[in-house]
Image (cartoon, rainbow, N blue to C red):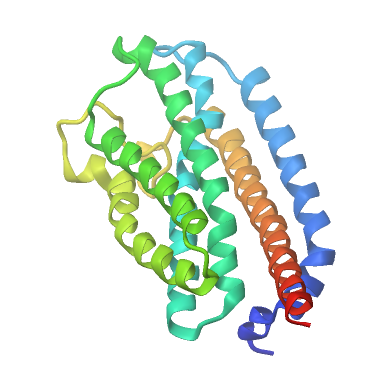
Amino acid sequence: MSIWEYANPKKFMASTGWLLPWVWGMAGLCLLVGLIWGYFFTPDDFRQGSTVKIIYLHVPSAMMAINAWVMMLVASLIWLIRRHHVSALAAKAAAPVGLTFTVIALVTGALWGQPMWGTWWAWDPRLTSFLILTLFYLGYIALWQAVENPDTAADLTAVLCLVGSVFALLSRYAVLFWNQGLHQGASLSLDKEENVADVFWFPLLVCIAGFVLLFVALVLMRTRTEIRARRLQALIARERLA
């Protein structure tokens, strides 16, 4: 069985119909366990105090904000190369979800930065590139709304997604490119010395799993809605011609 079979809208709707409730359930369970574990059963940090616990929202949302754009990039490339409509609709469906994660990351970052840095905002390389990524999200969504022809809109937004990917990468690796930024290094790393302490690390992993599953559930649900909307538009157009 080829993965490209799921590019067929009928196959996609049938397979995601039974999968979606399970993804919702696992997402809810992971978020419930991770957030309760992190906020109520971990100690305060010896430097940051209780503010350290904002990582259970900030880190997963920031990761998913970037990874959502990467997912949109992959889906857009599939559309440009193979012209599968489901991939274009999946990219469109992921954009508002990614934007929401981006806003959560910016807000929680500001709430953390004020007591730690003494300011709500700093033109740090990572923060600046993350803000630009937010503007790309807004532009991507606006472009879909502005272009009437869906295939033309898919083509134009795919190109915009390619350009915006530069800032998605900068948001992820700005700390490595510019050492003078205020933003700390990665909280999760293959280098064990750079990881947060295990008492924070394990509930953080559960929260990240919850955010990933939540993203998948939301994108699947919104993609299914986009497919239904496309079918409805086709039926209306057919009725008008008849």
Tell me which residue sits at (32%, 44%) in the image: 171
Q: For this view, does 24 lie left or right of residue 205? A: right
Which quadrant holds the C terminus? bottom right
Depicted 170 relative to depicted 7: above or below: above
Relative vertical location of residue 132 with respect to residue 74 in this rendering, above or below: above
Residue 179 in picture, x, y percent from top left: 16, 36
From where the camera sits, is residue 36 visible?
A: yes
Give the image location of residue 65, x and y in percent: 47, 45
Q: How many marks?
A: 0
Quarter that holds the N terminus: bottom right
Nearer-the-camera pick, 171 or 94? 94
Q: Residue at x 56, y 72 (%)?
A: 87
Quadrant housing residue 175: top left
Front residue of this view, candidates 94 and 139: 139
Along the line of sight, the residue nearer the viewer: 150 or 110: 150
Residue 93 image-quadrant placement? bottom right
Q: Residue furthest bottom?
A: 1
Query: x%, y% of residue 144?
Result: 49, 58
Is 68 on the left-hand or right-hand side of 177? right
The answer to whether residue 67 is visible is no
Residue at image coords 41%, 36%: 187
Camera-side residue: 148 or 165? 148
Task: Tell me if 197 is positioned left or right of 213 in this view.
Answer: left
116 to the left or right of 240: left
Give the image location of residue 20, x and y in percent: 78, 59
